[in-house]
Amino acid sequence: MKLSSFLLLFLLSVNLCAQTKEVAITIDDLPLNGAQFETARLRKMTENFLAAIKKHQIPAVGFVNERLLYHNSEADARIAILKLWLDGGVELGNHNFSHLGFANAALADYEDDFVRGDAVTRLLMKPNKPRYFRHPFLQQGKTAADEKAFEDFAATRGYKMAPVTVDVLDWMINAAHAKARSQNDEALVKRVGEEYVQFAAQRFDYSDQIAQELFGRPIKHIVLMHANELTAENLDALAAMLKNKGYKFISVEEALQDPIYQMPEKYFGSSDRLGHWAFSKGKKLNPPQPSEFLQQPYLDHQRNRR
Ligand SMILES: [Zn+2]
């Protein structure tokens, strides 16, 4: 075989490998997940996010809780921050108004909170329209019938559901980051960030392994992240880690073409689609958990709230 043929085969195989790993990035709880802080800091966080998104050319969707706009009489400033996301090329979606969970809500209340959830977003996005909904807490309806009724209702307003296949638990680990930042301990902030990216890598490996076991092939992933400082400051490193693993960033629209996103037969009540499929096929999942170092500040915070 000639050298050029070798080269062609090599390039083809590299290309095929690269195409097998795909992920769409989604960011929940815009404009700010977790403990709320002032606008200048929020603007900086948003700019960090958008810089990484631009650098790695990530076609992301950000899911808004519009109730978070009405904080501390800063609605105008927070609406301006939502506009920054749009100007940075991020599509906005609806995460309902008040982060209401479906598992404990009546269908009518849940539908009202969903409708109320896109009033500002819809205006900002003109002439485009919001088209994706993310269930808060990933909670689908109590029954398959409730979920179907809600999805049909949402469809009449132009919406599709956006389930997930990877959860990197940044909503939890963000507490460790916030605590280190509040102590002005930059070495600790850095360590939390590095260990978060390593943990995210383990979660991706696990989701890939489960997808292989359930479907015998790689799937088009959708990863759940949140609008917090932990992810804003580490998205660059996280995206680099994913690229090193051979992932290509795709849009939610592309990801949803994978049949994995069709609802499995046995109802599970979660937008964690791999978990749902595993349950439907009678398979137990045991995903890697964060170290005590990453997890403890969140658990302490939860305990103090009680
Ligand atoms: Zn959320």
Image: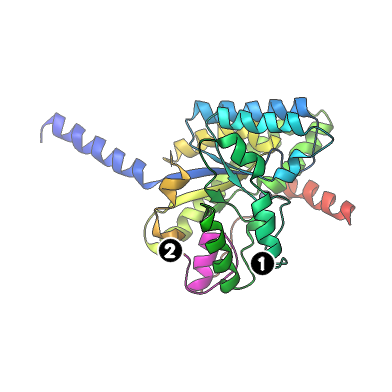
For the residues marked 2 and 1, what is the alpha-carbon distance in whole angstroms? 35 Å
Q: Which residues are magenta?
A: 263-281
Q: Residue at x 54, y 31 (%)?
A: 53
Crowdedness of circle 2 by 10 Å Cα count: few (<14), some, many (20+)? few
Q: Which quarter of the rendered picture does the N terminus lie within?
A: top left
Q: Are marks 2 and 1 in contact (CB under 8 Å)?
A: no
Q: Residue at x 19, y 34 (%)?
A: 8
Residue 187 showing in the rendered view:
no
Q: Which residue is mark 2?
A: 213
Q: Is residue 237 above or below residue 161?
A: above
Residue 123: x percent and y percent?
61, 37
Q: Secondary structure at mark 2?
A: helix
Crowdedness of circle 1 by 10 Å Cα count: few (<14), some, many (20+)? some
Q: Which residue is mark 1?
A: 107
Of 102 and 271, which appears nearest the observer?
Answer: 102
Of 52 and 133, which appears nearest the observer?
Answer: 133
Residue 39: x percent and y percent?
77, 28
> Left or right of 215: which side holds 68?
right
> Left or right of 41: which side holds 157?
left
Q: Amino acid at mark 2?
A: Glu
